[in-house]
Image (cartoon, rainbow, N blue to C red):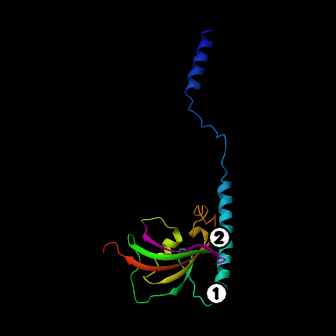
Amino acid sequence: MKHLLYIILLALVVFSCKSPEARMPETVQSGSFLKESAERNKKLNEQEQLLIQEIIKNNPDKDYIASESGFWYYYTAKIENDTIQPEFGDTIDFQYKVSDLNGNEIYAEAQKTYVMDKQELFTGLREGLKLMKPEESVTFIFPSQKAYGYYGDDNKIGTNIPLICEVTLNTITQEND
C-alpha cells in the first residue's frame, strides 16, 4: 500500500509539472475574403483603365499626360513662364466641374478655397492641383481609386465611379506670405 501511495504521488508530481499546451483556434481564417476583394479591385481597375484609354483614343486632338499617381490629364490653358505651384499649407482658389466618364455632369462648376494638404479633398484632385500653376486650366481623368473609391461622396457620386474634373487654378497664396 505504501508503494501505491508513492506511485500516485509521483504521478501527480510528473503530470502537474507539465507545461501548458496551446489550444487550436475554434475558427481558422483563410484570408479568402481579402484575396477575393483584391481580385475584384484588380478587375475593376482594368475595366476603368480600358474605358479611360478609349476616351484618350477618341480624343486625339488632346495631349494627354499620364501622371505618376495613376491619373491622366491635359491642359486647356497652360502657363509656361510662371514657376509657382501649390505646396503644403498654401491657400489656393480654384474652380472645378465634375462629370462621369460619359460626360454627364455630376457637380456644376463651383469655386473653392482650399489649404493644401490641411483640408479634406479627394486624393486625385489634391495631387492634380499640385501640378498646376495660377491661371492654368486642366482636365483630369481620375480612376475611381483616385476619386471617391468604394465609399463615394455620400451625395451624388456613388461607389467606384471614375471622374472627369475640369479645373482652373485662379490664385495661390503662399503660406509664408
Above or below: residue 93 compared with residue 32: below
Could you tell me the amino acid type at mark 2?
Answer: Asn
Q: Residue furthest left?
A: 177
Dot 1 or dot 2: first in sequence order is 2
The residue tagged 1 is 59
Which of the 4 image quadrants contains residue 10?
A: top right
Question: Dividing the image into 4 quarters, which one contains the N terminus?
Answer: top right
- Give me the residue at 59% from left, 25% from top: 15
Q: Secondary structure at mark 1?
A: loop
Residue 116 lies in the magenta-colored region: yes
- Give me the residue at 65% from left, 48% from top: 29
Instruction: Locate residue 67, reporting x and y percent.
Output: 53, 78
Above or below: residue 160 compared with residue 82: above
Could you tell me the amino acid type at mark 1?
Answer: Asn
Q: What secondary structure do most residues of the magenta stretch adopt?
A: strand
- Give me the residue at 49% from left, 80% from top: 168
Viewer-nearest of discs 1 and 2: 1
Magenta extent? 100-117
Instruction: Find out whether the residues at labels 1 and 2 contact each other: C-beta distance under 8 Å.
Output: no
Counting every numbered tag in the picture gives 2
Q: Residues within 10 Å of mark 1 (few under 14, many from 20)?
A: few
Mark 1 → mark 2, Cα distance in angstroms: 21 Å
The residue tagged 2 is 45
Question: Dividing the image into 4 quarters, which one contains the C terminus?
Answer: bottom left
Nearest the viewer among 72 and 22 is: 72
- Give me the residue at 64% from left, 87% from top: 59
Residue 50 lies in the magenta-colored region: no
